[in-house]
Amino acid sequence: MDRPRTIEAMQTARDCIATGEGIARGLSFPLQPSDIVIAPYAKCGTTWMQQIVHGLRTGGSMEFDEITAAVPWLELAHDLGIDLDAPQAATPRAFKSHADWDDVPKGGRYIVVFRDPADALVSLYRFFEGWLFEPGSIPLEDFALSEIAEGGWWRHAASWWRERDRTDILFLTYEGMSTDLPGTVARVADFIDPAISPEARNIALEQASFAFMKRHEARFDDHLIRQRRDAACGLPPGGSASKVSTGHAGKGLSLSETVRAALARRWDETMAHEFGHASYPELAAAVDARNLPRSA
């Protein structure tokens, strides 16, 4: 059994990760008002934020085999045999989702992280390489152009940013997480529960560092998904899909001029057209400005 070697074959395998029934069950799950849904687009800091939230609510418990078991993925839980109603390690309950605002279950509270789509594309490519497709078989440019044409990042970002005035959504940027992790942890803690102790905040900060997560990399590598879904996707065992990278921005600098032009066109047609943000840095600045301390 070989891994896919074309974009079409890769997409077929990708579409089998979650079943239609599983997605429907997850997106109809009744949330409680205290629930936290971590809802970035793929490769935009989801796992990092799962670790921050879990560390804050537990005071640093690492009693989990893989983060998906501790902070379940709504759209995939059914297909992984995870009961979304099962007691979690601590309160508030926390879940992961990549759904747009229009599709995500309502009634909880939400953390959305935006990331430069160029960087997210490269990260997604590296994540899939060696798992969903044979290393070296699909050029980065072909993969990126396919993802840009599909438009998932932009649909997701626009759907959430339309809701930017809601008080039950915390907006952050991956770049802000990278440059100011202490500030990020503090904002997330205050959003979850301002009464979270300084000790728990400090532990969560340490455990969200690149060095700590790299030492515990196997707890963030999606091995539960590979073990339980690779056969259904027609994939051979033994793939790798680590999520712990450098935590730094700038991966998109490796993209070709052709891809960068396609990214610019997609941006102009979507985020610039609807919201007036001429570029991703303008959107990121608008997000970061929301998180500045308000003067008395």
Image (cartoon, rainbow, N blue to C red):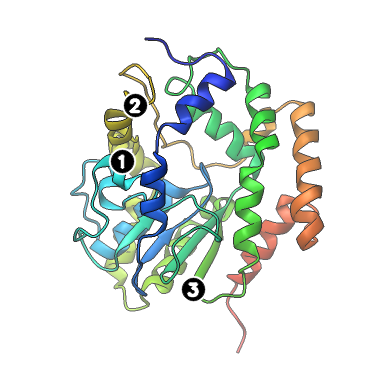
Give 165 or 126, whichever is nearer the viewer.
Answer: 165
- The 10 Å Cα crowd at callout 1, few under 14, some 14 to 19, many 20 or more, is some
Q: Which mark is residue 173?
A: none
Q: Which mark is residue 79?
A: 1
- The 10 Å Cα crowd at callout 3, few under 14, some 14 to 19, many 20 or more, is some
Give 267 or 104, whichever is nearer the viewer.
Answer: 104
| Residue under pointer 3 | 168
Which is closer to the viewer, label 1 or label 3? Answer: 1
Q: Residue furthest bottom?
A: 296
The residue under label 3 is which amino acid type?
Asp
129 in relation to 170, above or below? above
**Residue at image point 49% right, 22% down:** 129
Give 104 or 131, whichever is nearer the viewer.
Answer: 104
Distance in Å between CA atoms under marks 1 and 3: 29 Å
The residue under label 2 is which amino acid type?
Ala
| Tag 1 secondary structure | helix
| Residue under pointer 2 | 232
86 in relation to 242, above or below? below
State if disc 1 and disc 2 touch (CB < 8 Å). Answer: yes
**Residue at image point 20% right, 59% down:** 89
Which is closer to the viewer, label 3 or label 2? Answer: 2
**Residue at image point 59% right, 42% down:** 249
Q: Position of residue 188 (x, y in %)?
A: 43, 66
Distance in Å between CA atoms under marks 3 and 2: 37 Å
Q: Position of residue 268 (x, y in %)?
A: 81, 48
Left/right placement of residue 292 relative to residue 31 reads right
Q: Quadrant of the N terminus?
A: top left
Distance in Å between CA atoms under marks 2 and 1: 10 Å
